[in-house]
Image (cartoon, rainbow, N blue to C red):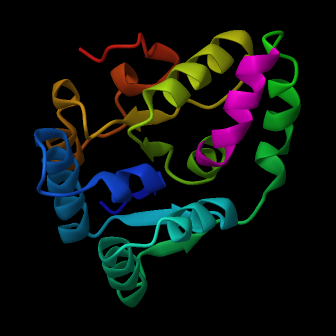
Amino acid sequence: MEECFIIDACVITSASPKTPVSKRVAAFLEIFLESKNKIGLTKALEKEWLRHPSTYTTKVLGLLKNQRRIIKISDHETVEDLRIKIHNIKDKQRVVAILKDIHLLEAAILTDKFIISLDNKARNNFNHFYNCISGIPDVCWVNPSEETEKAIEWILCEEKYDPSRFIINFKGVYV
């Protein structure tokens, strides 16, 4: 089954054969590229990807574009109220942090509800958001740099929509 993933730019920029962490990220991306899965790109996410130009980023985007595996995501009324709800959070420092990465959550909600990112701080901030505000659809978050998350096993499995990976269930350490 083909699914659409929202892949944060930090994933692309971290993939390399240099360290165990960057090797895990690169291995995950290679499996992704061999699959038929797609990526979703909002204008903000595409700008983020293009702000970090590298040979690898160009290769990945070119391959996905040639294979028609990029889904362009437009702003949509179903996520408009997310930003309003964020402003209801009392911790204004957290509001600023959440707004920095809200495009990931909005894009995931508009597609198949999967975020691939190395940013556990953002994940923790979104977890706080989920715990403060009700009515937000469940979204799975996978960090391919964390060995304990078994990201390659996850991308290869049939059922990816796993409650243990929901943002609301994030406890700072994935077990």
Residue at 62% x, 14% y is 128
* Residue 7 in sight in this render: no
Residue at 83% x, 9% y is 90
Q: Quadrant of residue 119?
A: top left
- Of the 4 image quadrants, the one containing the N terminus is bottom left
The residue nearer to you, when weighing 168 against 61, is 61
Give the residues drawn in magenta, as a range.
92-104
Residue 34, above or below 99: below
Image side of residue 94 versus residue 41, left or right:
right
Image side of residue 70 versus residue 31, left or right:
right
* x, y percent for residue 161: 37, 36
Residue 103 highlighted magenta (yes or no): yes
* Residue 162 in sight in this render: yes
Count of marks overlaid on the render:
0
Q: Quadrant of residue 138?
A: top right
Residue 74, above or below 136: below
Going by the picture, which residue comes out furthest to the front?
Answer: 18
Image side of residue 145 versus residue 73, left or right:
left
Residue 42 highlighted magenta (yes or no): no
Residue at 41% x, 76% y is 69
